[in-house]
């Protein structure tokens, strides 16, 4: 067992989770009914994009060190094809699904100018599957014996769930006005 690789794998996994949570929240802010306008929108979108790239870098390091570390049996195929690992098949498989979804979201984002808005958006909505998949992967596999790591993952879950609740319940004044006008009787 190479302890350095083991700790780097766990550390990069937790950093990936934290970055992914921030990216999810920023994505909801930029797509919601109360999205910012002007310079603040530019800053939020830039943060969303750059932190997404950071997530990919840390996740790549997480996967590479998990495969390279020999304490558990995770091979390169298991990092691409879900549920093929000899170690904790279900939980590693969830992590693999998360990696595959992230690759699809990032690829379509890089090709966004060549895709229809509908295709890009449908693939991008998979982030709502990616994030909880990663949370469960982290809780069940990566943080079992470490209270600090488990606490960070639980905090990410709470922040992400709060953001999803905000996104689902937020309304816009224009929408409320349209509903009020639609409810009026015709004279």
Image (tube, rainbow, N blue to C red):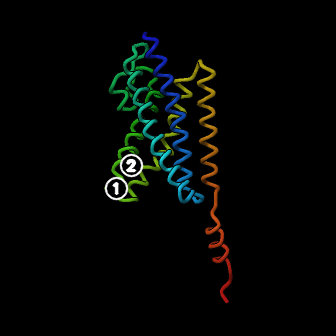
Q: Secondary structure at mark 2?
A: helix
Mark 1: few/some/many CA within 10 Å (<14, 14-19, 20+):
few
Residue located 51% across and 39% down the image: 131
Q: Where is residue 175? Give x, y as percent.
A: 61, 68
Q: Quadrant of residue 60?
A: top left
Q: Residue furthest front?
A: 39
Residue situated furthest bottom in the rendering: 187
The image shows residue 11, relative to residue 103, as above or below, that is above
Looking at the image, residue 3 lies above or below residue 101: above
- 10 Å neighbourhood of mark 2: few (<14), some, or many (≥20)? some
Give the mark count: 2
Q: CA distance from mark 2 to mark 1?
A: 8 Å
Residue at (35%, 47%) from the top-left corner? 110
Q: Quadrant of the N terminus?
A: top left
Q: Is residue 183 above or below residue 112?
A: below
In this rendering, the answer to whether 118 lies above or below 54 is: below
Residue 98: in sight, yes or no? no
| Disc number for residue 109 | 2
Question: Which residue does the image show at 64% across and 38% down from the upper left?
Answer: 158
Left/right placement of residue 186 relative to residue 88 reads right
Q: Disc 2, disc 1: CB below 8 Å?
A: no
Can you identify the residue that label 1 sits on?
113
Residue 81 badge: none
SS assignment at label 1 = helix
User: Is residue 108 shown to the viewer in this render?
Assistant: yes
Based on the displayed image, in which of its 4 quarters is residue 52 positioned?
A: top left
Q: Looking at the picture, how far across and down is residue 87, in whole percent?
A: 43, 20
Q: Residue at x 67, y 90 (%)?
A: 187
Q: Is residue 60 left or right of residue 168?
A: left
Task: Report x, y in % for residue 101.
Answer: 41, 41
Picture coordinates of residue 116 (x, y %)?
Answer: 36, 59
């Amino acid at each position: 067992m190479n302890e350095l690789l083991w700790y780097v794998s766990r550390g990069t996994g937790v950093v990936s989770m934290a970055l992914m949570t921030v990216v999810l929240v920023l994505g909801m802010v930029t797509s919601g009914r109360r999205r910012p306008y002007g310079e603040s929108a530019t800053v939020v979108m830039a943060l969303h994009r750059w932190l997404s790239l950071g997530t990919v870098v840390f996740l790549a390091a997480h996967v590479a060190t998990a495969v390279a570390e020999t304490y558990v049996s995770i091979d390169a195929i298991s990092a691409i094809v879900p549920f093929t690992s000899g170690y904790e098949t279900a939980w590693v498989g969830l992590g693999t699904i998360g990696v595959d979804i992230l690759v699809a979201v990032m690829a379509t984002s890089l090709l966004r100018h060549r895709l229809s808005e509908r295709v890009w958006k449908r693939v991008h909505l998979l982030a709502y599957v990616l994030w909880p998949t990663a949370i469960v992967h982290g809780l069940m596999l990566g943080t079992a014996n470490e209270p600090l790591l488990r606490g960070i993952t639980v905090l990410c879950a709470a922040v992400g769930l709060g953001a999803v609740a905000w996104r689902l319940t937020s309304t816009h004044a224009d929408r409320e006005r349209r509903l009020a006008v639609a409810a009026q009787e015709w004279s």
